[in-house]
Image (cartoon, rainbow, N blue to C red):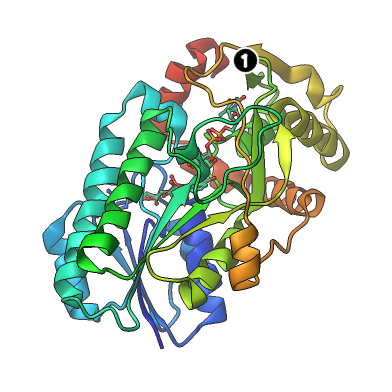
Amino acid sequence: MRRLLVTGGAGFIGSNFVRYWISCYPDDRVVNLDALTYAGNLENLREIETAPGYRFVHGDITDRDCVDRLFAEEAIDTVVNFAAESHVDRSILGPEAFIKTNIQGTFVLLEAARAAWQGEAQDRRFLHVSTDEVYGSLAPEAAAFTEQHRYAPNSPYSASKAASDHLVRAYHKTYGMPVLTTNCSNNYGPYQFPEKLIPLVILNALEGKPVPVYGDGMNIRDWLYVDDHCSGIDAVLADGRPGSVYNIGGNNEWHNIDIITLICERLDNLQPGQGSYQDLITYVKDRPGHDRRYAMDARRMQTELGWTPQHDFPEGLEETLKWYLDNLEWCDRVRTGEYRKYYATQYGEEAL
Ligand code: NAD
Ligand code: DAU
């Protein structure tokens, strides 16, 4: 039986992970520490909130007393650190929160784990969830990122994640902490906050609003269904080598414009409107420092841990579209006044 501290478990990937873990390992203890920022939502966890081993704690990973208390009360042996400011565009508008949560917060968690575990690495694991963005941008024909790729982050978000990855690495080298780092590509699936590309396209299309494409729409991302990310983290916790890094990816690269067009086509089928949703596609000013391409070489996950993604993209996207169509009220509830303010700043008042 494991005793997990999951941070950021009320966000998109974190809430999918908490549901995944409780359904796979119902006897484990899962303590979910989340500050409930604009991106955190307890509604994402309704299905499991009364599960016997589950506890939610409303708190901040930068609060050392709170984190120490949880280690002591819960005898935590496993940390899975999802908590972060996660949206690149917000990091460009206001980087400070990213420095605080992503760097300072990870530092606090590492220090608390080091104090609680007192050098006893046996059966303890500190898994830090990171991103492919730390490696920077790839040329169209370049080989995918391996775990040895040089770090070259280009946004305040990716720089803050890179800094946290370096801290995690240093705690292994210096203190022998049993850390693991996963760097994953773009996730998609249910409960993703609608500021991110796929849900934004779905909702804007359904509402007849412009569907914004940054720059020329030819930037490339690798897309992975969120449950596959969860099973990847599970595999790394089970058999990953402490001190190691694992790239997790979907081997599924798409130009932004192609994925946006595909979503519009699928919506034309699922929820026909007047004309095609493709007519709403609108090219807008590019994101500053916009990385051209990410691609992950996830062979270490396959050869060392036997992990491969289980969801093929058309099927995963279809499930995701249906989830959003079935959960439009959830979408309305998470798009609060704060989100509308962000949206107006990012896309212009007239786009609201
Ligand atoms: P998200 O923005 O949906 O959720 C973040 C969660 O962290 C929210 O519940 C929020 O309330 C919580 N949080 C923020 N600051 C906090 C703090 N100081 N203390 C405690 N909780 C806090 O993010 P996501 O998309 O689910 O990403 C989760 C993690 O995965 C992040 O670390 C991100 O860098 C990483 N990641 C995301 C993707 C992706 O495609 N979304 C891909 C690779 C890696
Ligand atoms: O690669 C992993 C990363 O994926 C994670 O670390 C981040 O937390 C996550 O937010 C995501 O970052 P991206 O910047 O790739 O995701 P986003 O959904 O913001 O954008 C995907 C692509 O679509 C990107 O090239 C920018 C473009 N885009 C995005 C938005 C919101 C548009 O063209 N129009 C938009 O309105």
Residue at image position (19%, 56%) is: 108
Q: Position of residue 26 (x, y in %)?
A: 50, 84
Q: Is residue 124 above or below residue 155?
A: below
Q: Secondary structure at mark 1?
A: loop
Image quarter where the C terminus lies is: top right
Residue at image position (81%, 49%) is: 314
Bin the neighbour count of mark 1 within 10 Å (Cα to Cα): few under 14, some 14-19, many 20 and up.
some
Residue type, label 1:
Gly
Choose top left, top right, bottom left or bottom right for residue 345.
top left
Residue at image position (32%, 70%) is: 178
Choose top left, top right, bottom left or bottom right for residue 91.
top left
Q: Is residue 261 left or right of residue 234?
A: right
Q: Is residue 346 left or right of residue 252?
A: left
Looking at the picture, tell me which residue is in the foreground, 137 or 346.
137
User: Within 8 Å of ligand 2, the CB of disc 1?
Assistant: yes
Residue pointed to by mark 1? 215
Q: Position of residue 121 (x, y in %)?
A: 28, 78
Looking at the picture, tell me which residue is in the foreground, 197 or 341.
197
Q: Position of residue 250 (x, y in %)?
A: 68, 51
Q: Is residue 250 above or below residue 231?
A: above
